[in-house]
Image (cartoon, rainbow, N blue to C red):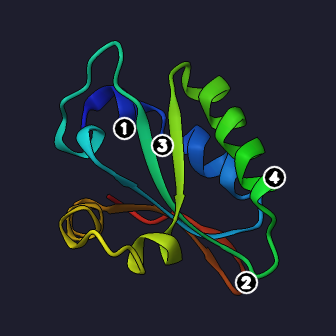
């Protein structure tokens, strides 16, 4: 993970603590340290039950504002059921946990 992205982990976690998210992971280019000016930050999210796609779309916009770059938010369950095995396997194998809510409150996962 790039040092530039690592710098943003605490603000990301603070933001996610306010959202209906059980777990958030990063995946893709940003996890390999290949951070360029056009690099999008890709999140794999496990939301609480009943979260609407509109809420996830709003989170994507909020995270873009927070990070100052494009953000993609994918649902973990959608990725797990992808029929494109290569893409599914790449996303799941490259994911790095960055946030996990606990029963007592939100906690941070260490990458």
**Is 35 positioned to the left or the right of 63 in the image?**
left
Query: Mark 4 = which residue?
Result: 54
The residues bearing labels 2 and 4 have C-alpha atoms spaced at a distance of 27 Å
Q: Badge 2 is on which residue?
A: 104
- Element at label 4: helix
Instruction: Please tell me which residue is depicted at 55% across the width and 26% down the height of the picture.
Output: 67
The mark that comes first in sequence, 3 or 2, is: 3
Vertical comparison of 37 with 92: above or below: above
Location of residue 49 by image quarter: bottom right
Query: Secondary structure under badge 1?
Result: helix
Which is more foreground, mark 2 or mark 4? 4
In the drawing, does residue 26 fall left or right of residue 91?
right
Q: Earlier in the sequence, mark 1 or mark 2?
A: 1
Q: Nearer the viewer, residue 34 or 11?
A: 34
Residue at left offset 61%, top offset 29% = 64
Is residue 103 visible to the viewer in this orientation of the structure?
Answer: yes
- Quarter the C terminus occupies: bottom left
Which residue, given by chain and number where applicable, does mark 1 sit on? 6
Q: Residue at x 37, y 33 (%)?
A: 5
Q: Residues within 10 Å of mark 2 (few under 14, many from 20)?
A: few
Q: Relative to residue 100, is residue 14 depicted above or below?
A: above
Q: Mark 4 Cα within 10 Å, few/some/many (few <14, many 20+)?
A: few
Per the rendering, the mark at residue 9 is 3
Q: CA distance from mark 1 to mark 2?
A: 25 Å
Q: Using the numbered discs, state the Cα–Cα distance from disc 3 to disc 2 in whole angstroms.
A: 21 Å
Q: For the residue labelled by badge 3, is the local secondary structure a helix, a strand or a loop?
A: helix
């Amino acid at each position: 993970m790039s040092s530039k992205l690592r710098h943003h982990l605490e603000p990301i976690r603070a933001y996610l603590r306010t959202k209906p998210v059980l777990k958030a992971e990063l995946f893709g280019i940003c996890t390999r340290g290949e951070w360029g000016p056009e690099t999008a930050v890709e999140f794999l999210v496990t939301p609480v039950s009943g979260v609407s796609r509109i809420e996830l779309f709003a989170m994507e916009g909020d995270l873009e504002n927070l990070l100052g770059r494009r953000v993609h938010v994918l649902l973990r369950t959608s990725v797990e059921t992808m029929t494109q095995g290569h893409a599914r396997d790449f996303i799941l194998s490259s994911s790095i946990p960055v946030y996990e809510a606990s029963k007592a409150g939100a906690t941070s996962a260490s990458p």
